[in-house]
Image (cartoon, rainbow, N blue to C red):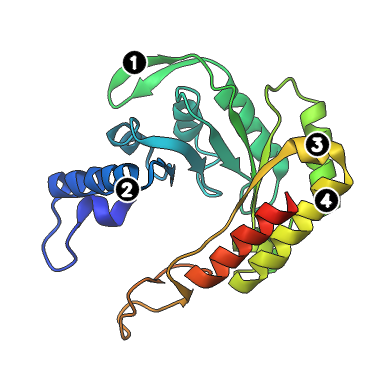
């Protein structure tokens, strides 16, 4: 993302080279200490190749899913790419993005003409939406999942799949609601075998300390400065609960 890439040390001036080195070292440390590779949001498509050898999953955000370069870049990746529904909630935009990502393209990337083979692992992420009055509208309920399944059925797409984002507009950023939302999604999967095949996982926003903090206030290490997140203990309980229910 933009912060660490451009300014790895908040107390020094921006330095992109040091930022690239810091980010790669962080990912290598995760790999060496846990054996797991990370997921990342593709905020800037042309930055992806700096980490392409270390990632296992990529998400395209709600404000990027309509962008052509994001769609084209996703079509050339050899790992699963999740396309979030836009903030408007129009699922057809998300499905068009998945369609574009699953097909081959010739396009310009970093001033080079490149060809992609299409990404059969491009899929949907439901994160809720907001109407013109700013009211959040969730889309994780049973009927929303059935609707997405029907949309997949009408389109010639490979590997129909969905990840449910339990925060953002699905929770109205009430971060403690994520556990309840996760439980409801798991119940929907168990009730309908077709949804068990469709819904592949959950996206949870968590960090070391629960909640969030404003920049410039007393700094709490491990507490989000963006969206509020579940803390470590609540995250551990939720993961164990999900494991029991699956």
Q: CA distance from mark 2 to mark 3?
A: 38 Å
**Mark 4 or 2: the one toward you:** 2
Q: Work out whether mark 4 precedes mark 1 in sequence or the reverse, and give the earlier one.
A: 1
Q: Work out whether mark 1 precedes mark 2 in sequence or the reverse, and give the earlier one.
A: 2
Q: CA distance from mark 4 to mark 3?
A: 13 Å
* Residue 228 visible in the picture: no
Q: CA distance from mark 4 to mark 1?
A: 45 Å
Residue 242 appears in which quarter of the rendering?
bottom right
Say whether residue 216 is left or right of residue 16. right
Q: Kindly identify which residue carries mark 1.
A: 113
Q: Kindly identify which residue carries mark 2.
A: 33
**Residue plotted at (15% across, 56% down):** 14
Q: Residues within 10 Å of mark 4 (few under 14, many from 20)?
A: many
**Residue plotted at (57% across, 38% down):** 82
**Mark 1 or 2: the one toward you:** 2
Q: Kindly identify which residue carries mark 3.
A: 149
Q: Are marks 4 and 2 in contact (CB under 8 Å)?
A: no
Label 2: state its secondary structure.
Answer: helix
Q: Kindly identify which residue carries mark 4.
A: 188
> In the current view of this chain or complex, which residue is farthest to the bottom?
218
Label 3: state its secondary structure.
Answer: helix
On screen, residue 161 above or below 207: above
- Total labels: the figure holds 4
Q: CA distance from mark 1 to mark 2?
A: 38 Å
Q: Work out whether mark 1 precedes mark 3 in sequence or the reverse, and give the earlier one.
A: 1
On screen, residue 83 above or below 229: above
């Amino acid at each position: 993302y933009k912060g660490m890439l451009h300014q790895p040390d908040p107390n020094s001036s921006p330095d992109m080279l040091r930022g690239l080195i810091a980010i790669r070292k962080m990912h290598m440390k995760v790999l060496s200490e846990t054996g797991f590779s990370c997921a990342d949001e593709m905020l800037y498509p042309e930055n992806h190749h700096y980490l392409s050898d270390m990632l296992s999953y990529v998400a395209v955000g709600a404000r990027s899913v309509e962008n052509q370069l994001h769609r084209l870049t996703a079509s050339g990746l050899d790992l699963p790419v999740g396309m979030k529904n836009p903030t408007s909630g129009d699922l057809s935009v998300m499905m068009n993005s998945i369609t574009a990502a699953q097909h081959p393209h010739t396009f310009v990337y970093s001033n080079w003409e490149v060809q992609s083979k299409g990404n059969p692992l491009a899929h949907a992420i439901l994160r809720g939406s907001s109407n013109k009055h700013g009211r959040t509208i969730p889309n994780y309920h049973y009927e929303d999942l059935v609707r997405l399944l029907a949309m997949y059925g009408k389109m010639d797409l490979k590997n129909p799949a969905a990840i449910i984002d339990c925060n953002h507009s699905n929770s109205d950023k009430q971060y403690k609601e994520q556990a309840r939302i996760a439980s409801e999604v798991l119940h929907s999967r168990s009730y309908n075998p077709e949804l068990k095949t469709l819904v592949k996982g959950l996206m949870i926003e968590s960090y070391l300390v629960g909640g969030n903090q404003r920049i410039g206030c007393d700094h709490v290490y491990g507490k989000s400065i963006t969206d509020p997140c579940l803390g470590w203990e609540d995250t551990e309980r939720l993961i164990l609960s999900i494991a029991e229910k699956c």
